[in-house]
Amino acid sequence: MANSITSILDEETLPSKLVIPATLLVAVILMVMYGFELTYTRNKIIILSLIGALVTLSVLYLFPKKWIFKSRALYLIIFHLVLSSILIFVVPVHSALLYMWAPLIFMSDYYYQSLGLYLSSVSLLIVLILSDWHQKSQITKSSALGILFELIIIVTASLIISKLAFGNRKERKELDSQYVQAEYEHDRLLSLINTMSDAVIATDETGKITTYNAAALDLLNTNKTLVDTPIDKVMKLTTGSGEEVSLSKLAIKTPFLQRRTDICLPIGDDDNINLDISISRIAPSMLKEEQQGFTFLFRDITERKSLDEERDLFISEVSHELRTPITISEGDMSMAVLLADKKTPNIGEIKNSIKKAHEQVVYLGDMVNDLSALSRAQLENKSMEVTTFNISEVIDELMQTYRPQAESKGLYFKTELTSNIAQLTTSKLYFKEIMQNFITNAIKYTQKGGIIVKAQSVDKDNVLISVTDTGAGIARSEQNKVYQKFWRSEDPYTRSTSGTGLGLYITAKLAQRIGGYLMLDSEIKKGSTFSVVIPLKAFKQVDQGSVTKNEVAHLFS
Ligand code: ADP
């Protein structure tokens, strides 16, 4: 009963299920009393207007709230006034209608606690005194006792009803506010996990899904509801070696928290998402066993894994590449020491060993320079200085620098630039570095003939600059390897020249950074053409404010 009364009273306004019957009941009683001539006054107008007021109040209650203003306090005041008028002016003192005041005290107490109880009881006392005074023109000792007695009876009766219906109101209010707080916390947590970029799934003890967030749907690429579905059914996971993994079995073995980074979620034929999975047990002691369960947190670490793998591979390649020159130079230096220790040292042999060791040290220097250039080029977040410049100016500068080297090998070195070529707005440093790599390679890998540098527009937004040589050329089967790090052709002539195999790898990265790409056209023993296609305004969008001047000025120094 308590619950049903509570749910009625918890309406926003005064409950219509109580207001309408009670108002009509009072109206009917008034009519009956009037009919049987039981009322104190026979004034038809007063009685009919009060009956009319009661009926109107109950009819108004049938209208939806948005049409009629139904303030709880206002209605309570109106009811107190109407009943007071009836008790003072219409019905005789101490009539049975007096007991209709009990529900008024009861509701005032429910909605406005002690203040409501106090105001309603005091109003009753005043009404009792006034009705006695009005109808008997005096208050005797016995009628004062009668008033007190009736007041006590009515207030006590309404308090007893209230206690029976709701128990301890204070406790109930506390429970109510705790419930509201818990609901609020629950909603807050739900919206929090929904904003997480990591997928979260909670299951019960048997592995059936109870809660999940938007990222979980995203990871599983579904929009179906997952509640009550076994987690192993929606997440078919495997280890790196292809063995199946059951999350619910893993969870049961989890004492408190478990983390796995070796599990993947297969997607499509040959593709996997590498996951970092944290499993934790929800087992507060106050929960029953069937209420306990697990939470799973999934993070996609595919990209990080492949970066880690690439980095490990790179370190192993670099250490391998460094080991050879170090071993050779160490051998040559030991040989030089041995030769110097001889009784009659041969200066020529010693010089030769030191020269060979020196070559290897120079090579190591080149390698270290290339590696540091590479690491700077890979720091993609670094801003670069963007300027507008003439392509021909840069090429002329490079011609002057490298012509002596080409001519010393007996090679011609020419340029063919179209006159209307537009200006470039990009990193001059990167552009120069790309051209420098093409030109030095062309000179290095060409024995006879020469080199031509060309520049031409591709379309209104892009320009193509190429370096053509008549050198060793690169076999068709090897052409796709030239941009790989440390790759050098097996060709004996190439092997007789010094080189790290990093130049074109870096060149490709730089071209990519300024929004361009490389092309190669080559025929073995006939020559090669290395080209770069660059957008004329590669950095139109760059926020000049974020560009650090001279940030990369020393990049390849
Ligand atoms: P490096 O020149 O230091 O060896 P690169 O990355 O610049 O490194 O070049 C990689 C390889 O590509 C060279 O070792 C060479 O075999 C080949 N290569 C590059 N440019 C040319 C060219 N112009 N003609 C022939 N082969 C070339």
Image (cartoon, rainbow, N blue to C red):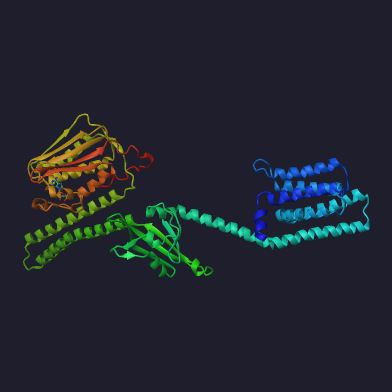
Direction from residue 158 to residue 248 in the image, left or right: left
Which residue is farthest top? 420
| The N terminus sits in image quarter | bottom right
Provide residue 464's location: percent of width, then percent of height: 21, 37
Is residue 84 at least partly visible in the picture?
no
As rendered, which of 344 and 188 lies closer to the eye?
188
Direction from residue 92 to residue 216 in the image, left or right: left
Is residue 37 at least partly visible in the picture?
yes
Provide residue 38's location: percent of width, then percent of height: 87, 50
As rendered, which of 372 and 33 lies closer to the eye?
33
Task: Look at 7% across and 61% down and name the residue there.
Answer: 349
Provide residue 205's location: percent of width, then percent of height: 45, 67
When asked about the image quadrant of residue 357, the answer is: bottom left
Tally of marks: 0
When asked about the image quadrant of residue 280, the answer is: bottom left
| In the rendered image, the vertical position of residue 528 relative to residue 251, given as above or below | above
| In the rendered image, the vertical position of residue 492 relative to residue 285, given as above or below | above
Task: Look at 91% across and 49% down and name the residue there.
Answer: 135
As rendered, which of 324 and 506 lies closer to the eye?
506
When asked about the image quadrant of residue 407, the answer is: top left
Which residue is farthest front? 36
Provide residue 312's location: percent of width, then percent of height: 27, 59
As rendered, which of 440 and 95 lies closer to the eye?
95
